[in-house]
Image (cartoon, rainbow, N blue to C red):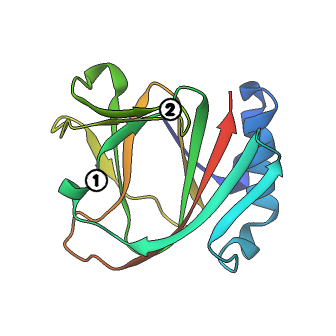
């Protein structure tokens, strides 16, 4: 897992072609991202694509940890009170579901020893396949509207 800022997006060239492409796109369009409508967008076909989502933040117990085999996730909260959870995937023991089509494994584990945090505007969180993560919840009891971007970067 990496937490970074879009202003330093050029520093991620060691991640091959797709991660820098995604981060540079986000940095170049940072001022416009909040104006995008909910929906799916492509940067480079299926290699780099993203979704803008708007939803109500859930209670933590309503969300599950997940991992992806074929993609790196890059999350950016644009508006609202959203928390993230992280734990090493090898700590996950109770698989809830696995969808090859959606490239998602969900886990029942609550992972009390996980790390929970919020990202500030202009920051991104990059989750590798070995990073179990959950998002779209609120720990402070202030559930409310959230707008965010999730970029899917093909490995």
Please tell me how crowded label 1 is: few (under 14), some (14-19), or many (20+) other residues with Cα within 10 Å: some
Question: Which of 138 and 56 lies nearest the eye of the viewer?
Answer: 56
Per the image, the residue denoted by label 2 is 68
Q: Is residue 64 above or below residue 79?
A: above
Residue 50, given in percent of the width and then of the height, sits at 67, 54
Q: Is residue 139 above or below residue 2?
A: below
| Left or right side of 73 for 49 | right
SS class of the residue under badge 1? loop
Dot 2 or dot 1, earlier in sequence? 1
| Left or right side of 92 for 48 | right
Per the image, the residue denoted by label 1 is 63
Residue 140, by quadrant, is: bottom left
For the point 60% across and 28% down, the residue is 70
Residue 104, given in percent of the width and then of the height, sits at 46, 36
For the point 77% across and 38% down, the residue is 47
Question: Which of 154 and 112 lies nearest the eye of the viewer?
Answer: 154
């Amino acid at each position: 897992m990496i937490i970074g800022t879009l202003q330093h997006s050029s520093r991620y060239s060691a991640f091959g072609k797709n991660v820098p492409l995604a981060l540079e796109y986000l940095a170049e369009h940072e001022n416009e991202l909040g104006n995008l409508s909910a929906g799916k967008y492509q940067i480079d076909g299926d290699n780099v694509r993203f979704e803008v989502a708007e939803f109500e933040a859930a209670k933590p117990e309503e969300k599950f940890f997940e991992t992806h085999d074929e993609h790196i996730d890059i999350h950016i909260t644009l508006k609202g009170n959203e928390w993230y959870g992280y734990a090493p995937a090898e700590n996950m023991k109770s698989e809830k579901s696995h969808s090859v089509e959606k490239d998602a494994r969900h886990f029942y584990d609550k992972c009390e020893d996980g790390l929970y945090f919020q990202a500030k505007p202009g920051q991104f969180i990059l989750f590798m396949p070995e990073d179990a993560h959950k998002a779209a919840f609120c720990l402070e009891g202030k559930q409310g509207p959230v707008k965010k971007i999730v970029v899917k970067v093909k490995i």
